[in-house]
Amino acid sequence: MFDFHGYGPSIFKGAFLTIEVAVLSMVIALILGMAGALAKLSPNGLLRGVASTYTTVIRGVPDLVLMLLIFFGAQIMMNSFSDWVYDNFGYEFFININAFVAGVVTIGFIFGAYMAETFRGAFLAVDTGQIEAGKAYGMTARQIFLRIIFPQMMRHALPGLGNNWMVLLKTTALVSVIGLTDMVRLAKEASGAVHEPFKFFIPVAIVYLGITFLSEQLLKWLETRYSAGVIRH
Amino acid sequence: MFDSLAALLNQNEIFTVSTLFQYWDGLVVTVQLVFLSLVMGLVISLPLALVQSLKNPWINKPIWLYVYVFRGTPLLIQLYIIYYGVTYIDGIQESFMWVIFKDPFYPALLAFMLNTAAYTTEILRGAIKATPHGEIEAARAYGMSWWKMTYRIVGPSAFRRALPAYSNEVIFMLHASAIASIVTIVDLTGAAQNIYSRFYAPFEAFIFVALIYLCLTFSIVYVFKRLEKRLLAHLQPR
């Protein structure tokens, strides 16, 4: 049953690649999401417009299409850039778009839009009276953000954030399409070579389930932590 | 008029009449896939969600497992298991099922249907569970049977409560259907990939298809907004 025809170790490595892609793109998504939420709530109309366009367009287009667009499009842009450099400066070079970077950046960029919506809702859920109280105490904007808004916002954002993380985790399977050797691609290659699809795809599915289960536990712990001081019914 | 339109289209290299027809064929495939899987997924999930409200552990445990597995693993893996897996089931190539499964459309439809059924079951279960207890007590006090209570009291209100979440699921399914192109189905994304590799023009090919998806998404959002306005009118702020 557990004979993987020698593919076991490489699929195991592929699992680590999946986690790496997921964690790195989550970091990008969190940063973009925070920036997007702040821009959406800013009094500056231009910033709001840019942020709304970003969240609307990204959430309206399939991940796979965006991934193909960025992966293939970035390569063409790089090629024309190196052509331009060669024509003007006579210096010849070639940049190959790395599938790992393209995958991480694209997933981070996509989920930044979802995170922005989550964070925006969470910001709005913080009582304005508390922010006013902070101002009345003479706190700087930074202090108000770090001491009053952020800890309370996290409480409201956590369930949505957790949801986004689970969806993101499953989206990482798509990086196999643009040539990254994550566990999905390795399982596909192995099952193609050995003609036993179930033997490779089902363990990979179980690994995903395992990561989902662990994430759920971590999320529960985080939610308890950030809900300290709140009465729950 | 069509001639002048064709002449206009033939002035550029990429968006000629023939490539636009490729996009159109892709659009038809995408809409078929999404619509059929959503309808069949809804048909499967309704009884599952209803049966779950009976709280029989022998029924609920398997349903819970089904929902957990399909929501906890990527759709791509589910598609691969069904698409590559069915070929290796003993004797399937000789049976009548092979007529269906040798075409990638049906394995993809099966995978999408099972996936959306799992998500929809969870949405409906949540909506049924959120029925105010007083309504159920009132129905019981009137001596309604379980069936009567379900289709008169719980069903209509749960359906309305599920609507916003279900609209998200519909959009999610539209976007998820793009992975059908990975198993050689020429849906919208598949058409874009073909046009990309024909002209080596990623921006034109993929941005155009992104705009079509965007229009589809907006149409879905619009339809559900209208539906919500009608069905949830009693909850609107006056």
Image (cartoon, rainbow, N blue to C red):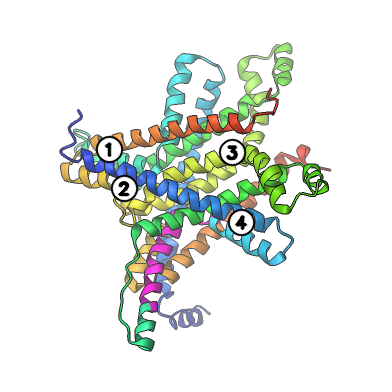
- CA separation in Å, label 3 and label 4: 17 Å
Mark 1–mark 2 Cα distance, whole angstroms, equals 33 Å
Task: Report the chain holding disc 4.
Answer: A
Please name the amino acid that badge 4 sits on.
Answer: Gly
Give the residue type at disc 3: Leu
Query: Spatial distance from mark 4 to mark 1, Cα to Cα?
Result: 50 Å
Amino acid type for the residue under numbered disc 2: Asp
- SS state under label 1: helix
Magenta highlight range = A59-81
Does the residue at mark 1 contact the one at mark 2 (Cβ under 8 Å)? no
Residue at image position (71%, 15%) is B137
Subunit ID for the residue under disc 2: A
Q: Which residue is mark 2?
A: A182
- A148, above or below B31, in the image: above
Please give the residue where the numbered disc 1 appears in the rendered image.
B97
Q: Are marks 2 and 3 on the same chain?
A: yes
Circle number at residue A36: 4
Q: Residue at x 66, y 42 (%)?
A: A153
Q: Nearer the viewer, residue A175 or B191?
A: A175
The type of residue carrying mark 1 is Met
